[in-house]
Amino acid sequence: MENTVAAEKAKPEDKNVSDRQKALDTALAQIERQFGKGSVMKMSDRQAQVIEVIPTGSIALDIALGIGGLPRGRIIEIYGPESSGKTTLTLHAIANAQKAGGICAFIDAEHAFDAEYAKKLGV
């Protein structure tokens, strides 16, 4: 008798899980129809990727970023209020990338680039 009661109690939960799975499968199918096969990546299907990084010049920030620096080969936007260290951070990262043989572009939206300061930081 106890087994029957336990089985009956599990049925509503199983139905709930089944409904959720169906809803998820429907949503994933819709996304793949709209954006193409392979547009949804399941994190459980992939092994951890090894990403080349450029150190920022700040050990604490490199640790906080989770991969040891800025990902190499990607466009990086540094955003923040005036005088918050955006240019200094960027120039340190550029200097580290150049030391490793990289080529960098610096887009100065604030019109505050100082070539002498950049040179002192290793750019």
Image (cartoon, helix red, strand yellow):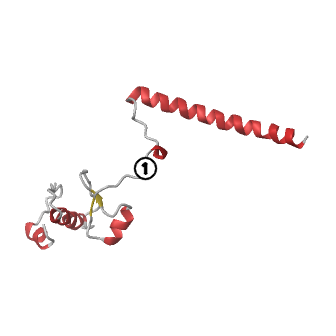
Q: Amino acid at mark 1?
A: Gln
Examine the rendered structure and indicate whether residue 103 appears above or below residue 27. below
Q: Which residue is mark 1?
A: 47
Count neighbours of disc 1 (C-alpha within 10 A) and say few if under 14, some if 14 to 19, many if 20 or more.
Answer: few
On the image, the x and y values in percent for residue 111 come to 13, 59
Count of labels in the image? 1
Which quadrant holds residue 72? bottom left
On the image, the x and y values in percent for residue 18 come to 65, 34
Going by the picture, which residue comes out furthest to the right? 1
Going by the picture, which residue comes out furthest to the front? 47
Examine the rendered structure and indicate whether residue 120 appears above or below residue 76. below
Residue 73 vs residue 6: left or right? left
| Quadrant housing the C terminus | bottom left
Q: Report if residue 37 is visible in the image.
A: yes
Q: Residue at x 43, y 30 (%)?
A: 32
Q: Residue at x 39, y 34 (%)?
A: 38
| Quadrant housing the N terminus | top right
Which quadrant holds residue 85? bottom left
On the image, the x and y values in percent for residue 27 come to 51, 32
Which quadrant holds residue 65? bottom left
Disc 1 is placed on an element classified as: loop
Going by the picture, which residue comes out furthest to the bottom? 120
Q: Residue at x 16, y 66 (%)?
A: 99
On the image, the x and y values in percent for residue 17 come to 65, 38
Residue 105 vs residue 25: left or right? left
Examine the rendered structure and indicate whether residue 43 appears above or below residue 93. above
* Front residue (pair 6, 78): 6
* Front residue (pair 24, 113): 24
Going by the picture, which residue comes out furthest to the left? 116
Q: Report if residue 79 is visible in the image.
A: no
Residue 19 vs residue 115: left or right? right
